[in-house]
């Protein structure tokens, strides 16, 4: 049923809309009549299959004040159906030695299932029943709410996480990415069964979902099995996520949370970044990698860690999400003034002077050379296919990515540094045994 | 519906699975054996090669038989400090070179220190793993530790220690292990106690390197898309010229005094949620009873159908999470139960329930379905673990270092498969007793008014 000719999309009648293989890689894509896309990477080296039913709406679609709704909904899909209790589902899954869990990020939610390939039929039965007939059982909701509350409380014990949460509060405002996808102690108790059902009915539609699978499977067999099980799943219009773009403050807008019980200071700062589909994505990522992509060989790593001995970990990155998101830099240090000074200086230097040819070549070599490492395992393949489909990179992405990276020029990277870094216009959160006077920052709006 | 008919036939399915399982384990075993090549270089470097050409990727890793287990009193964390310093300077490489060279060749790398071993690895596309051999041979034979480069890295390690200091769960963990074990070096945190970390000297690092880092105290494990003869040639070329010196590793098998009753520990910290931990003194991996402990841990606490999860979380609603773990220690170790209570007030009740359930485990037999579920999980886990070249390298290396033979990789499912319900019951009845237990509680610090 699938095309084996490279770069060919065949229009088929009846069962599937179109089928394609991807440029020599055993990647295949079908679209079922109800809009559900089935995307697979055949890899028979182990008798195992890993798959995720991805809904293109995630934590960013949580209703206002109900952060964690998408996460809870996704987990509840694995906790019982109209004909099978949550305990029965867990019993079957654990007996098979399989893994079946909800997943959520800002841009997607869903359920993932990993099983031995001999159990693929049972796994698909479980998955399709979960997608079509979730029970949202009240007892299971309370069980999951308790577990999620415990998890977010535990997060609050970790200053590394606390600084991220506080940065979110300071920088994002009402933006859809401005809350933890896991929710918080205020939002989780407010989520009712009706909210979960509403999220599911609104977003969990076949035309807003895709099934991605990698491993010991045959694409045609899997697509047919999915079609057989999920043909009753009905499509419906799905709201499009929009948001006003984030706007950088005119100068540093910082909050210091003094914690005398800590012996180290946790710093996160940043400004608006780019989207996953920005045409400058590759130049920006190469520049960001050179600036702070590694702890020991990036500019930040060399100055703050290797030479300065100021921190175990220092880094910066542009988040890759559907909506334009954030550029962030982080460090944990007992000498925040020195570390922040170096980081601000390095970012400004990057903005003003860009990168060298040698740095760009090294970064290109890293991106092209390490790309196969990212899809060596089944989970890696799954992740790459998910990204490819989620952001519409196209079936040729895996094959063409190295050439696209190599084609990026020094001018493009330096332009990305000038256009996409915004020195001095950061939101910044500092948590530790310090006051604002200790940081030596000037030209700052302090937030109490 | 199809699903219903399949599930109602679960019993039949289980029986057929039973029949398949033995064959599946045997097939996996044969397949792995056919892929492994093992030999020693003349200098004593042990080499294990695992061939898997399914993806053009190679993990090259070197494992030293040194960790916090070997460190003398007052020098805890020294192996970890050495791990950091080993990235600084060799005969030809300088600070930052390891990462720069690896990354610019499209590779990823890391290092880590544990109680029993220190490991370094590089992942590369299979046409360039020679660089990893070159770098790791330099690390093994030619590290130099200039005074001038010590201070900054000492600062880095001190910052890493501070990350541990500021996480209440880690603080609790460190104090709990040091209470459950009195004399064994297993009680020490791998990163080292704070005062020891502050006191490191570059001279101590140099001495530790001279004493422990050499081919005869290490294993080279290469996994992925390689030709065994090519690995051998490269191993000879880069590592063969290094001098090996056998290192005597002190064995602390009998170091722990007999436990004379329950030990209790309460730690307070800036946490919003209490935690509970129970540790029972049990046989380590050199005792065949350890496998019964692995099965007992799975039945008691692995997953939502396990005994303790069902009782504490689902039936009684006292806790939000449970985990149970039979530690992988060469010496007698710990069988640990961790519980996240819903509220501090429930702690006494949880203690009672945990004890009642482990006592029940010492009297009642697990069902055949439960035993089969454990076997299935092990088979699935073994299969999933083979999906990563690093995972395979890690598994082979730790089997060699901890169990003395990489074949533990294939023997593990067989050993677990042979454990009987009676052995699990007897294990629980023998070891999971209150007077053989350490109970630890992490409580939220009361705010001063």
Image: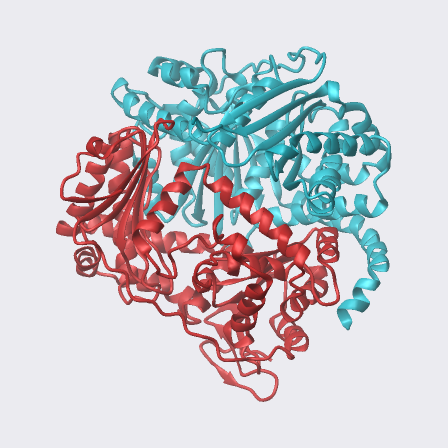
Quadrant hosting residue A34? bottom right
What colour scheme does the image use?
by chain
Q: Position of residue A19 (x, y in %)?
A: 53, 79
Chain B colour as displayed: cyan
Does residue B230 appear in this view?
no
Quadrant of the frame with the C terminus of chain A: top left
Q: Give the number of callouts.
A: 0
The residue depicted at 20 percent of the width and 37 percent of the height is A342
The residue located at (65%, 39%) in the rendering is B322
Residue at the far bottom: name it.
Answer: A13
- Please say if B166 is above or below A150: above
Which of the 4 quarters of the picture holds residue B95? top left
Task: Give the quadrant of the N terminus of chain A.
Answer: bottom right
B371 relative to A201 in the view: left or right? right
Q: Is residue B88 visible?
A: yes
Q: Could you say which chain is coloured red in the image?
A: A
Q: Is residue B162 left or right of residue A21?
A: left
> Quick one: A180 or A333, which is closer to the camera?
A180
As drawn, is A378 to the left or to the right of A287?
A: right
Q: Is residue B378 above or below residue A25?
A: above
Residue B318, x across and y down, in percent:
67, 40
Q: Position of residue A422 (x, y in %)?
A: 19, 53
Residue A176 appears in which quarter of the rendering? bottom left
- Considering depth in this image, is A149 or A342 the residue closer to the camera? A149
Q: Residue furthest front?
A: B449
Q: Residue at x 22, y 40 (%)?
A: A343
Q: Position of residue B106 (x, y in %)?
A: 37, 49
**Going 28% across and 58% down the picture, which residue do you hit?**
A273
């Amino acid at each position: 049923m699938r095309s084996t000719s490279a770069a060919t999309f065949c229009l088929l009648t009846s069962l599937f809309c179109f089928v394609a293989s991807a440029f020599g890689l055993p990647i295949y894509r079908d679209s079922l009549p109800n809009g559900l896309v089935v995307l697979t990477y055949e890899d028979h080296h182990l008798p195992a299959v890993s798959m995720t039913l991805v809904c293109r709406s995630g934590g960013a679609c949580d209703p206002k004040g109900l952060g964690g709704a998408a996460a809870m909904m996704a987990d509840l899909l694995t906790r019982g159906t109209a004909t099978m209790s949550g305990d029965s589902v867990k019993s079957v899954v654990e007996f098979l030695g399989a893994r079946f869990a909800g997943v959520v990020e800002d841009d997607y939610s869903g359920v993932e299932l990993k099983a031995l390939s001999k159990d693929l039929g049972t796994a698909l039965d479980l998955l399709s029943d979960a997608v079509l007939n979730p029970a949202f059982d009240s007892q299971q909701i309370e069980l999951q709410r308790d577990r999620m509350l415990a998890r977010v409380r535990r997060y609050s014990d970790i200053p590394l996480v606390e600084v991220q949460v506080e940065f979110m509060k300071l920088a994002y405002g009402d933006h859809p990415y401005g809350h933890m996808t896991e929710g918080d102690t205020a939002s989780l108790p407010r989520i009712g069964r009706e909210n979960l059902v509403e999220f599911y009915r609104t977003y969990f539609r076949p035309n807003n979902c895709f099934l991605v699978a990698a491993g010991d499977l045959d694409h045609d067999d899997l697509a047919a099995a999915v079609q057989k099980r999920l043909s009753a799943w009905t499509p419906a219009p799905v709201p499009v996520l929009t948001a006003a773009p984030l706007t950088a403050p005119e100068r540093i807008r910082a909050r210091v949370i003094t914690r005398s019980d800590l012996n180290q200071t946790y710093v996160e700062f940043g400004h608006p970044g780019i989207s996953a589909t920005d045409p400058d994505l590759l130049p920006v990522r190469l520049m960001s990698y050179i600036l702070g992509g590694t702890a020991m060989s990036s500019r930040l790593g060399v100055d703050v860690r290797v030479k300065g001995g100021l921190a175990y970990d220092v880094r910066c990155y542009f988040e890759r999400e559907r909506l334009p998101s954030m550029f962030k830099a982080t460090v944990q240090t007992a000498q925040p003034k020195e570390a922040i000074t170096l980081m601000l200086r390095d970012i400004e230097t990057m903005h003003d002077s860009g990168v060298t040819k040698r740095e760009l070549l090294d970064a290109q070599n890293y991106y092209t050379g390490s790309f196969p490492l990212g899809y060596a395992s089944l989970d890696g393949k799954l992740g790459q296919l998910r990204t490819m489909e989620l952001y519409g990179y196209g079936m040729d992405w895996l094959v063409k990515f190295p050439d696209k990276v190599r084609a990026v020029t020094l001018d493009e990277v330096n332009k990305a540094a000038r256009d996409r870094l915004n020195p001095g216009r950061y939101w910044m959160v500092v948590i530790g045994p310090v006051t604002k006077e200790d940081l030596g920052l000037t030209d700052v709006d302090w937030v109490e | 519906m199809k699903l219903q008919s399949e599930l109602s036939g679960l019993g039949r399915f289980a029986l057929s699975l039973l029949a398949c399982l033995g064959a599946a384990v045997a097939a996996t075993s044969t397949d792995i054996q056919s892929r492994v090549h093992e030999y020693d270089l003349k200098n004593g470097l042990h080499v294990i090669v695992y061939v898997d050409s399914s993806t053009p990727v190679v993990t090259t890793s070197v494992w030293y038989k040194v960790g916090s287990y070997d460190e003398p009193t007052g020098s805890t964390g020294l192996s970890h400090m050495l791990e950091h310093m080993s990235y600084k300077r060799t005969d030809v490489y300088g600070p930052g070179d390891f990462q720069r060279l690896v990354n610019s060749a499209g590779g990823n790398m890391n290092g880590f220190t544990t109680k029993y071993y220190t490991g370094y690895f590089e992942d590369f596309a299979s046409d360039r793993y020679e660089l990893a051999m070159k770098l790791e041979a330099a690390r093994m034979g030619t590290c130099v530790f200039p005074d001038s480069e010590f201070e900054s890295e000492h600062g880095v390690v001190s910052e890493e220690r501070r990350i541990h200091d500021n996480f209440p769960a880690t603080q609790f963990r460190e104090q709990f292990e040091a209470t459950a074990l009195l004399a064994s070096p297993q009680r020490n945190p791998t990163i080292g106690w704070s005062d020891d970390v502050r006191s490191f000297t570059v001279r101590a690092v140099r001495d530790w390197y001279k004493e422990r880092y050499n081919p005869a105290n290490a294993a080279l494990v290469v996994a992925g898309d390689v030709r065994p003869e090519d690995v051998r040639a490269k191993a000879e070329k880069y590592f063969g010229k290094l001098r090996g010196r056998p290192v005597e590793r002190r064995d602390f098998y009998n170091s722990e005094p007999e436990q004379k009753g329950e030990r209790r520990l309460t730690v307070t910290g800036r946490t919003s949620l209490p935690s509970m931990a129970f540790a029972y003194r049990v046989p380590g991996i050199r005792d065949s009873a350890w496998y019964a402990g692995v099965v007992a841990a799975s039945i008691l606490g692995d997953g939502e159908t396990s005994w303790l999860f069902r009782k504490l979380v689902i039936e009684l609603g006292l806790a939000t999470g449970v985990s149970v773990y039979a530690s992988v220690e060469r010496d007698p170790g710990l069988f640990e139960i961790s519980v996240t209570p819903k509220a501090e007030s429930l702690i006494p009740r949880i203690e009672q329930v945990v004890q009642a359930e482990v006592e029940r485990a010492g009297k009642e037999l697990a069902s055949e379905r439960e035993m089969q579920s454990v076997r299935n999980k092990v088979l699935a886990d073994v299969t999933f673990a083979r999906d990563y070249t690093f995972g395979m390298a890690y598994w082979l290396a730790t089997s060699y270092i901890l169990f003395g033979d990489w074949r533990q990789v294939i023997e593990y499912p067989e050993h677990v498969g042979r454990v009987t319900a009676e052995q699990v019951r007897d294990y629980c009845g023998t070891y999971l007793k209150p007077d053989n237990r350490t109970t630890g509680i992490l409580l939220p610090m009361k705010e001063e008014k």
